[in-house]
């Protein structure tokens, strides 16, 4: 399926619409309702990309804030990570990660600028979400709350991340924590600790930074849709970090040696 031409056509139509609307000075600041956001999210995760492109075009023309559309594309990309099945090749984690971090970058940029050229990036992100659909076949089941109180000891999560192939159990721990009344800030700190103790590569830092930033953006809104969006960010971050842990953890040790040398300490004493 050739999706280049539909995007080009949509961008051309947006440019024509902007040129016609320029004399009247229209602004794009309409925010979608929760129901409309839910419908768009479903469309972004669907198998009909041409309809997705058309819907995004129509929403922008109708005055929907491009930054909000970018935020929903980032949410759909995070959902791909939540649904990523561990039966996929391990190297494919990077594919869904790249889509998510790209979509996040577009979202952040559109919050700072309403430059029309940036709008095409929304379509590129949406199409990338579509192309990642095969990595959700089969689909990893979203964990369900067990109904118990939030786990009190965060060391339990860190212990899970000391073992390989704990993507599912770690996500379940987080789900129980969220729905049991756990403090999200403390959870983010624990995930940050889990990241820093590993020999984490650049992509893991990208995952954490993007998930936390998107979580914070959803904090500004209330309602069940926003709550689930925040849940998605926490689950996506947890699953990705769990998939890439544990490592040899040589970097933290190297950092400690460097810090001791910086302070002028002796690493050893000769006899």
Image: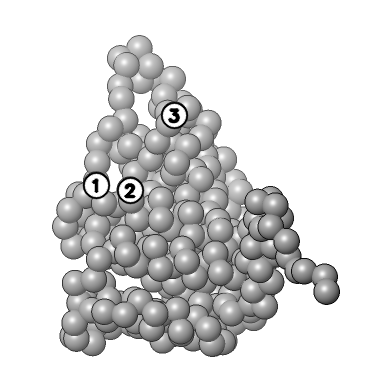
Q: Nearer the viewer, residue 69 or 97?
A: 97
Q: Position of residue 67 (x, y in %)?
A: 38, 40
Q: Give the residue drawn at x 34%, y 59%.
A: 41
Pick whichever of labels 2 and 3 is earlier in the sequence. Answer: 3
- On the question of residue 252 being in view, the answer is yes
Relative to 265, 229 lies left or right? left
What's the residue at 77%, 69% (across, down)?
Answer: 269
| Residue labelled with disc 2 | 217
Q: Which is more toward the observer, 243 or 86? A: 243
224 displayed left or right of 76: left
Q: Quadrant of residue 108?
A: top left
Name the element at disc 2.
helix
Taking the spot 35% from the left edge, 76% from the top edge, the residue there is 154
Above or below residue 126? Residue 231 is below
Question: In the figure, residue 155 lies in which quadrant?
Answer: bottom left
Q: Do callouts 2 and 3 mark residues in contact (Cβ within 8 Å)?
A: no
- Which-is-in-front pick, marks 3 and 1? 1
> Residue at label 1?
220
Residue at (27, 81) in percent of width and height: 151
Callout 2–callout 1 Cβ contact below 8 Å: yes
Q: Is residue 237 above or below residue 102?
A: below
- Disc 3 target residue: 113
- Name above or below for residue 13 compared with residue 105: above
Q: CA distance from mark 3 to mark 1?
A: 19 Å
């Amino acid at each position: 399926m050739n999706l280049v031409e539909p995007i080009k056509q949509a961008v051309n139509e947006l440019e024509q619409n902007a040129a016609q609307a320029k004399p009247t000075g229209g602004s794009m600041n309409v925010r979608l309702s929760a129901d409309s956001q839910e419908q768009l999210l479903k469309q972004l995760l669907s198998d009909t990309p041409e309809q997705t492109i058309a819907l995004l075009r129509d929403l922008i023309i109708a005055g929907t804030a491009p930054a909000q559309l970018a935020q929903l594309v980032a949410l759909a990309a995070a959902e791909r990570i939540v649904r990523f099945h561990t039966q996929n090749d391990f190297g494919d984690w990077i594919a869904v990660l790249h889509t998510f971090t790209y979509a996040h970058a577009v979202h952040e940029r559109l919050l700072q600028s309403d430059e029309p050229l940036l709008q095409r990036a929304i379509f590129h992100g949406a199409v990338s979400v579509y192309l990642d659909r095969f990595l959700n076949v089969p689909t990893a089941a979203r964990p369900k709350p067990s109904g118990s109180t939030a786990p009190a000891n965060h060391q339990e999560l860190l212990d899970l991340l000391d073992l390989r192939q704990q993507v599912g159990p770690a996500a379940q721990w987080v789900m129980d924590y969220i729905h049991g009344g756990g403090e999200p800030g403390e959870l983010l700190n624990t995930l940050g600790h889990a990241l820093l103790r590993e020999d984490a590569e650049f992509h893991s830092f990208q995952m954490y930074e993007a998930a936390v930033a998107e979580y914070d953006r959803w904090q500004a809104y209330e309602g069940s849709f926003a709550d689930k969006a925040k849940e998605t960010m926490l689950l996506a971050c947890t699953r990705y970090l769990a998939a890439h842990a544990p490592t040899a953890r040589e970097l933290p040790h190297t950092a400690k040696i460097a810090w001791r040398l910086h302070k002028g300490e002796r690493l050893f004493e000769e006899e």
